[in-house]
Image (tube, grey):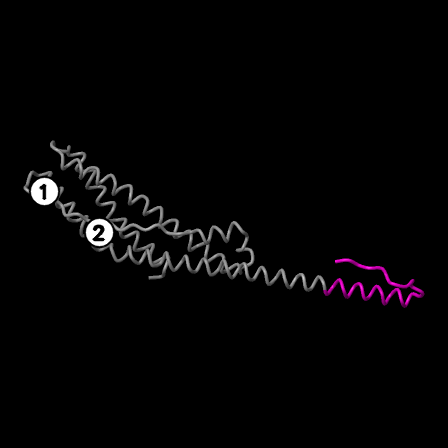
Amino acid sequence: MDVHPPHNPIQSVKEFMVHLLAITIGLLIALGLESSVEWLHHRHVAEDARENIRAEYRANRQDIARQMKALPAEQKHLEEILGWMTDVQSGHPQKPLAEFMWTSVLLRDAAWNAASSTGAVAFMKYDEVRQYSQLYDLQRLYGSVLERNLNERHQMNVILERMKSPGKLSDAEFEQAKRLILSQELTIQEFRELDGAIFGN
């Protein structure tokens, strides 16, 4: 903002005070307008971030609900694999395992990361930011459990593929596969607990 000198020379203290008062009022109005514009901008940034986080939360909730719906079938399939492996280990005849489609999800966190890195969270209320932070921490925990589950499933599938080839697995390999199956069954319970913690189910 530019401050211009008076058009005519100041003749008295009264004129000086009037001119000074006019400058002061002008500066205060300009600063007030600038602060209002900045406040509106911050509010808009926070609202955009909030809406993106909510949309991301809804999408993650739908994906987790899809996985929760698939868990009973996955648990049943794990029990079938365990029974089949026990039959193979003891030399009993068995039918081939049926094909099975596992369900896995990848939870999103781009909206939260963007809000954090751009500073949008600084324009939100503390309690709101704390709740979002806790939610995304739980989602990261869910993701780490899922990653462990995928790794164990991969190891189990390697053993199942080896069982299709000639030659028998060692008892240690059978026991390793059974431990992997048990771990995956326990993971299903962990998924349910995390689902309850994240979504309050």
Kind of residue at badge 1: Asp
Question: Callout 2 environment at 10 Å: few (<14), some (14 to 19), or many (20+)?
Answer: some
Separation of marks 1 and 2 at Cα, in angstroms:
20 Å
| Residue that numbered label 2 is attached to | 74
Image coordinates for residue 169, horizontal then vertical, percent:
14, 33
Please give the count of numbered marks on the rendered protein.
2
Residue at the front extreme of this rendering? 7
Looking at the picture, does residue 148 appear above or below residue 173? below
Q: Identify the residue at image location x=37%, y=49%.
A: 141
Q: Identify the residue at image location x=77%, y=58%.
A: 2
Left or right: where 68 falls relative to 174: right
Image coordinates for residue 182, horizontal then vertical, percent:
22, 45
Q: Identify the residue at image location x=14%, y=37%.
A: 164
Q: Secondary structure at mark 2?
A: helix
Kind of residue at badge 2: Glu
Q: Which residues are magenta?
A: 1-29
Image coordinates for residue 76, horizontal then vertical, percent:
18, 52
Residue at the right extreme of this rendering? 11
Q: Quadrant of residue 53?
A: bottom left
Q: Identify the residue at image location x=36%, y=48%.
A: 143
| Residue that numbered label 1 is attached to | 87
